[in-house]
Image: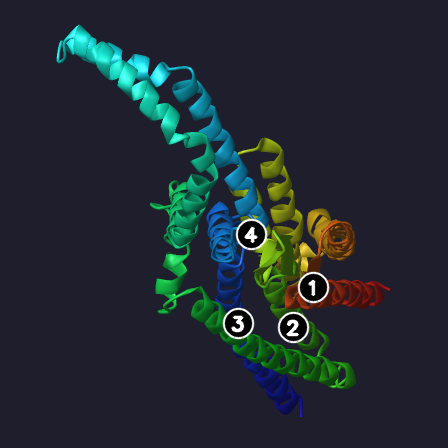
Amino acid sequence: MRIILSVIISLALGFSAFHAYKLYHLSKSENELKYDYAEINKIKYGLFNIDVWKQSIYSIMEEKIGDFEITGESYDVIRDQIEKYLEQLYEEYFMSGKLIESLMGENAKENNVGKILLNLFKGGIEKQIEEIDFKSKIPDISNQLILELKKRSPEIKKAISKEISDMLLAETGKTLVDRRQYYFKKYEQEDFVSTNLYLEEKIESVNIESKKLIRIIIISLLLALLLLLFVSKILAFKTSMIFLSLVSILFLALGLALPMIDLDARLSSVDIQLLDKNIHFDEQVMYFQSKSIIDVTRTLLENHALDMKIVGLLILLFSIILPAAKMILSLFYLFVKRIRDKVVINTIIFYMGKWSMADVFVVAIFMSYIGMYGLINSQIVDTGTMANLDTLNYSKLSPGIIFFTSYCILSIIMSSLIQRHYKRQKV
């Protein structure tokens, strides 16, 4: 009977370990997809992208120019200004004789005409100018100029459009290539829209598969634990503890390797009114991070700041090395009698284990999640009240926290069972 039960529990553990391995690699792929999705949807490519703003403004201005018309009132104002200008010319050049003086002066310098002829010409031209009555013809000249202006209205629109286009695109002409081309090529897509859609579908399918694997692993491990609970009196104590330690190690490995928390703050849509026109930006990521304990430790240790390295070392020691050491030493404690009286071994298994910070780390993760969730929500609400913004907070706890918490509980139970068992033996 013991052999059959041991085989069943071993199969459940092996089945769980196989699917845990698959889950780990699937989680890495999912994380890569999420980071790439967050990158191509970052706010720096949308709301904070100066090239996008220039293109939007250019489109609006081009549309406004298309609607540009000179109204009747505007033509009246232009006509008045033309008439004033012509009257000013009349007073300055015709009435004052400045035009004739200028003409006489130029010819005298060139010696083209004799002085006597120039004087005769001057007398004749003055009489001709008086007879012209240029002033009375100013309104007719203004009307003719207005007619020409109306005929050339399309050319004026085109000229204005060209000037605005040159002004807005002068600095962006060389930089309008989408900086996300790397991701388009990576996923063999043509543009942002197709890449975005592909990543959304891929993340969804991978997420469904991950949830399926998590359910399989949890059910298999729970089955193994239930069997251990109900048949603990049939199986030998050491055998039960071996199986319990293997379950704990599986939980610990998954808890360390899988992401524990996703921090995801987005602007789901942004609508900004400019010159009575709406500029729309779709889903934009403000902040995204998805880290496991191993990832956090590696990031801190790779940081150049000394205080970050110290924190990384503490997490490595108390949340990775010490829990793993505790599991290994617990197994040695069961089979090697001479180490049971060692103070160091007892301290690590039964006392220092309580200060391994694994349980403290879980509480810290929960508190960080609650704090970050509240902070992001408050910032989003404040931002939303200042502009027409639709904001979303997709932050959530990830599967790693489930497995790490399960390890903490099983670790405490296992230590208590071993300690109580050997205390009874001594008595």
The residue beneath circle 1 is 396
Image quarter where the C terminus lies is: bottom right
Mark sitting earlier along the chain (3/1): 3
**In the rendering, at what x and y percent does residue 55 appear?**
46, 52
Identify the secondary structure beneath mark 1: strand
Mark sitting earlier along the chain (2/1): 2
Task: Bin the neighbour count of mark 1 within 10 Å (Cα to Cα): few under 14, some 14-19, many 20 and up.
Answer: some
> Mark 3 and mark 2: span between their CA atoms?
34 Å
Mark sitting earlier along the chain (3/2): 3
Identify the secondary structure beneath mark 2: helix
**Residue 142 visible at all:** yes
Q: Nearer the viewer, residue 253 or 26?
A: 26
Residue type of the residue flagged with mark 3: Glu
> Mark 2 and mark 1: span between their CA atoms?
26 Å
The residue beneath circle 2 is 247
The residue beneath circle 4 is 71
**Nearest to viewer (mark 4 / mark 2):** 4
Residue type of the residue flagged with mark 1: Lys
Residue type of the residue flagged with mark 2: Val
Task: Bin the neighbour count of mark 2 within 10 Å (Cα to Cα): few under 14, some 14-19, many 20 and up.
Answer: many
Left or right: 125, with 175 as reference point: left
**Nearest to viewer (mark 3 / mark 1):** 3
Mark sitting earlier along the chain (1/4): 4
Mark sitting earlier along the chain (4/3): 4
Residue type of the residue flagged with mark 4: Thr
